Amino acid sequence: MEHYTMHLTLKVWRQKNADSKGRFETYEVKDISSEMSFLEMFDVLNERLIREGKEPIAFDHDCREGICGTCSMYINGRPHGPWHATTTCQLHMRAFRNGDTIVVEPWRAKAFPVIKDLIVNRNAFDRIIQAGGYISVNTGNAVDGNAIPIKKENADKAFAAAACIGCGACVAACKNSSALLFVSAKVAHLALLPQGEPERKTRVVSMIEQMDKEGFGSCTFTQACEAVCPKEISITNISRLKKEYLRAGLESDR
């Protein structure tokens, strides 16, 4: 693959905190390698800003391997940028052309208030998980992996749902700021496994109640969430969640 350098214009959202008024600031970056990741490009820019005695741009990151879900930002109006099924940290500068203008913003959702610049507070997701996205069965010593028979079809579906990294791209892409794809993935992967059976009814009710408390919007099934998910979580999980919620309501009435 041909390697080349780029000159780019960045329009980056700067905001001191959740209570401050934000604004776009423009930066020119030169001699950027096409093989850099998007976050490495930001590292180069921040090093320059620090040398100039200016405030570096705050952005979230951790593993830089597409696993942790913290590298969340809009890039030219699309969560995580132009590449399909890719986190921001795995996006490379060859996705853009020399001379491009790139607009970078934080997630825009009431439930994700801005902490600073491109960092948002996603503790709402943590509270949803704490409401029911776990199993509390005392298993004692570790058991053999094959001790509990599970249909391969269910195991595959559970594994696919569990791939969700909780980045919030689904919320950012949804016109209603719905978190239902995230919640459905967490509900579905446990509902498909026997280990999740003891708390199956209370889990889905508690997690949906917490989701509503956090101020996320309603799902109108536009499928924008699935389109931008870096782990390609399927919207079929939303259908499964609704089935689980209906089942929990019917069984509680007995």
Image (cartoon, rainbow, N blue to C red):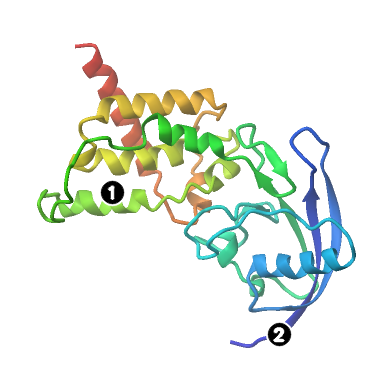
* Amino acid type shown at disc 1: Ala
Q: Tell me, for residue 34, which label it has, or none.
A: none
Whether residue 224 is visible to the viewer of this picture, yes or no, is: no
Q: Which residue is mark 1?
A: 158
| Residue lying at the far top of the rendered structure | 253
On screen, residue 183 versus residue 105, left or right, reads left
Residue 14 x/y as whole percent: 80, 48
Instruction: Name which residue lies at 56% across and 67% down.
Output: 90
Residue 16 x/y as whole percent: 80, 43
Distance between mark 1 and mark 2 Cα atoms: 42 Å
Q: Is residue 147 above or below residue 193?
A: below
Along the line of sight, the residue nearer the viewer: 86 or 166? 166
10 Å crowding of disc 2: few (<14), some (14-19), many (20+) = few
On screen, residue 24 versus residue 154, left or right, reads right
Residue 97 sits in quarter:
bottom right
| Residue lying at the far bottom of the rendered structure | 2
Along the line of sight, the residue nearer the viewer: 39 or 135? 135
Instruction: Name which residue lies at 85% across and 63% down.
Output: 27
- For the C terminus, give its image quadrant: top left
Residue 98 x/y as whole percent: 76, 75
**At numbered mark 2, what does the secondary structure look like: helix, strand or loop?**
loop
10 Å crowding of disc 1: few (<14), some (14-19), many (20+) = many
- For the N terminus, give its image quadrant: bottom right
Instruction: Name which residue lies at 42% across and 27% down.
Output: 208
| Residue lying at the far right of the rendered structure | 52
Q: Which residue is mark 2?
A: 4
Whether residue 243 is visible to the viewer of this picture, yes or no, is: yes
